[in-house]
Amino acid sequence: MTQILKLEGLMVRFGGLTAVNGVSLTIASGEIRGLIGPNGAGKTTLFNAISGLAPASAGSVHLDGLEITSKSAPQRAALGIRRTFQTVQLVQSFTVYENLLFGLHTRAGNPLTRLIVGSYATPDADADAIIDEVLDYLGMRDLKHRVVDTLTIAHQRYVEIGRALVARPKLLMLDEPTAGLSPAQIERLDDLIGRLSSDWKVSILLVEHVIPLVVKLCSRITVLDRGRVIAEGTGAEIGQDAAVQKAYLGERLDA
Ligand SMILES: Nc1ncnc2c1ncn2[C@@H]1O[C@H](COP(=O)(O)OP(=O)(O)OP(=O)(O)O)[C@@H](O)[C@H]1O
């Protein structure tokens, strides 16, 4: 099976602190991989190292067979890595449509967005059609011209996912997508994430504190603690793992 993402011995240091410490992992095409770990384990830093926001101190990152370790974040985005953030990062005073255009133009050639986010590919003739397709998929067509800061946090999270999808990424990284959502909203998002990988032919790396959701969605889960991978396996396997139980100390994985 094709490996979409391969990390080998990845390290990220902040001065004397090693936030990511020799992480190696591979994600297969179409896989939904869970990434869990206690607070401060290094999950967001690992996301940043994969997406190019945190430079690797050592090790390598390959995307779909291409080494991208020294590529910038905009170059990685253009090559097919897209992500969402723990705290939603949209242009709040822009409409849903305008925010999705940003996602599209990181792979197309709009001069303004190229100045802001960089661009390495050819312009898209049919931005509107792509955006409408994504909004229809997300059930948000009626919100297309709404200003983002008038939307619920749940809808804002969908817009972030939409901004990633318009670029038809190879790897979609979701950083705590359920943060701030109600149980009903989490259930809907859970259903969406479960469909995304096959509907959009995208591999997903999911960081999430709602462990039952990760266990349900992901056939394999990687567990980080203090920057290191301490376990990898199915939900049942990692639930039984003594090192994982110790790292979570009291948090119930089967809750
Ligand atoms: N820019 C930075 N400068 C210095 N230290 C940092 C920086 N970013 C993260 N850290 C430190 O790196 C470690 C890993 O942090 P990180 O945010 O990646 O963990 P996390 O697993 O995502 O945590 P959480 O689940 O709480 O979001 C922590 O000790 C954190 O304080």
Image (tube, rainbow, N blue to C red):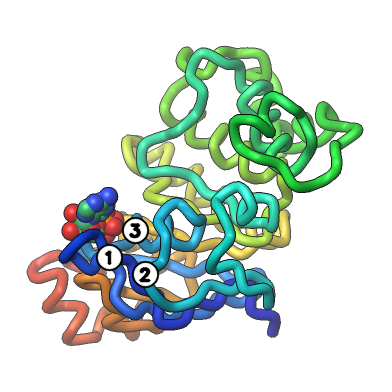
Residue holding disc 1? 13
| Residue 193 percent across, percent down from the top left | 55, 53
Q: Nearer the viewer, residue 89 or 190?
A: 89
Quadrant housing residue 235: bottom left
Figure quadrant of the N terminus: bottom right
Alpha carbon of mark 1 to alpha carbon of mark 2: how far? 6 Å
Q: Which of pointers 2 and 3 indicates the residue nearer the eye?
A: 2
Tell whether label 2 touches label 1 (CB within 8 Å). Answer: yes
Q: Which mark is residue 45?
A: 3
Q: Is mark 3 within 8 Å of ligand 1?
A: yes
Q: Which of pointers 1 and 3 indicates the residue nearer the eye?
A: 1
Q: Is residue 228 left or right of residue 63?
A: left
Rendered position, 127 above or below 16: above
Q: Which mark is residue 228?
A: none
Helix, strand or loop for disc 1: strand
Alpha carbon of mark 1 to alpha carbon of mark 3: how far? 10 Å
Looking at the rendered structure, the kind of residue marked 2 is Ser
Q: Looking at the image, which residue is at 34% across and 80% down?
A: 22
Q: Is residue 197 left or right of residue 54?
A: right
| Residue 238 percent across, percent down from the top left | 30, 81
Q: Is mark 2 within 8 Å of ligand 1?
A: no
Looking at the rendered structure, the kind of residue marked 1 is Arg
Query: N-terminal of the two: label 1 or label 3?
Result: 1
Label 3 environment density (alpha carbons within 10 Å; few <14, some 14–19, many ≥20): many
Q: Nearer the viewer, residue 58 or 128?
A: 58
Q: Residue furthest left?
A: 250
Tell whether label 3 touches label 1 (CB within 8 Å). Answer: no
Helix, strand or loop for disc 2: loop
Tell whether label 3 touches label 2 (CB within 8 Å). Answer: no
Looking at the rendered structure, the kind of residue marked 3 is Thr
Q: Nearer the viewer, residue 119 or 176?
A: 119
Q: Which mark is residue 57?
A: 2
